[in-house]
Amino acid sequence: MHTQIIDTANSLWSETLQKLRHDTYHLPEYFCLEARRTKTIPEAVLITEGESILFVPYLLRQCDDIFTESIPQEIFDIVSPYGYPSILLSEAANNRDFLDLAISELKKVLSSKGVCSAFFRLHPILNHNFDEIFPPDTFTFNGQTVSVDLKLSVPEIWAHTRKGHQSTINKCKRLGFTARMVPVWEYFEQFLVIYEQTMDRVGAKEVYYFDNNYFSDLSKLGDKLSLCIVEFEGEVISASLFFECCGIVQAHLGGTKTEFLSKSPFNLLLDYARYWAKDRGNEFLHIGGGIGGSKEDSLYTFKSGFSKQRHTFLTLRMVADEDMYDKLVRLQAKELNLESEDLLKSNFFPAYRFQN
């Protein structure tokens, strides 16, 4: 078994992706833009044995900014970028012997570089069978996500659409709303206004706001990035970015102008996007889950009206250095005037980053 830690500048990152089905979230360009946004270091652990490949990309962040009390040594933890970056496996790696050893090796190599814990968001489509092929209790269930099965015929896709959504889509068309894909950067300023207005309206957390540098960096994704808009009398009233890679289209960021919200033009946008994605030969239009990607809330209910297809959303919560993890939990509990058990029972991971 051969193990390497590589960065995004290493050609091995892209060469490995060429051997594995992946998504836009795995590209070195995407990891670089997320690293700049989060002030982290983009890396990946690559474990190979013959044709068996385990590829684990991540963002490395320091822990010294969590506590007011200084930490005597340099400690890191790991987080996934925004979206569904996941762990990738080659077909030959789908056997328990390799996976048992690979997970043990992953934990060992992370611990050796000062990583205390690691939180990985898995890919609901690419990692669909992970809870079956990995050791029991390796992953945490975080709910379900929704995708449109683009292998279905157009009439079948429409038939799998909730009646209320069908009515709304038809109403939008009668009102004269039209949807189309447009050159991203020609309409980008209009998209940005709509997106920020949407985030303000829903009271989104800071994590859902992105600066101009982030959006500028998106241009490096090239033809993997598309923009869909809905117009009314020449005005863009709804817009969304989409990623496209290896047969998977992902709805990334989008929204609707407040004054048109009652007309629900985003329904028409997603309706158009799924047939556009199908025409391009894709298999999935993944539209995600609820707020935070997991809750079965009103956002999830809305998305679930476009398809009957569901996916399990898992996370990997790994403690690489148990002694250090316990130490940091005790330290954070002291700062918050709580007991360590209170943090550990919070279901927040890592527990030492819990805030009241």
Image (cartoon, helix red, strand yellow):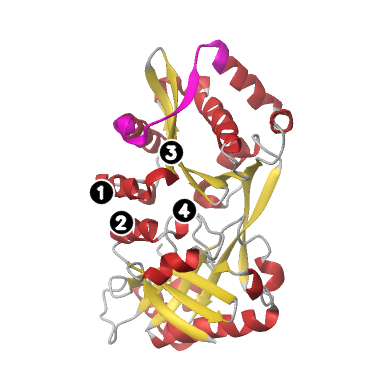
Chain-order first, disc 4 or disc 2: 4
Query: Does residue 326 show up?
Result: no
Tag 4 residue: 24
Magenta region: 172-189
Question: In the rendered structure, does residue 62 fall within the stretch colored magenta?
Answer: no
The nearer-to-camera label among 4 and 2 is: 4
Q: Residues within 10 Å of mark 2 (few under 14, many from 20)?
A: some
Chain-order first, disc 3 or disc 1: 1
Q: Is residue 32 above or below residue 48?
A: above
Kind of element beneath mark 3? strand
At which x and y percent is residue 241?
43, 39
Chain-order first, disc 2 or disc 1: 2
Please, what is the three-letter code of the amino acid marked with disc 4? Answer: Thr
Kind of element beneath mark 2? helix
Tag 3 residue: 226
Chain-order first, disc 1 or disc 4: 4
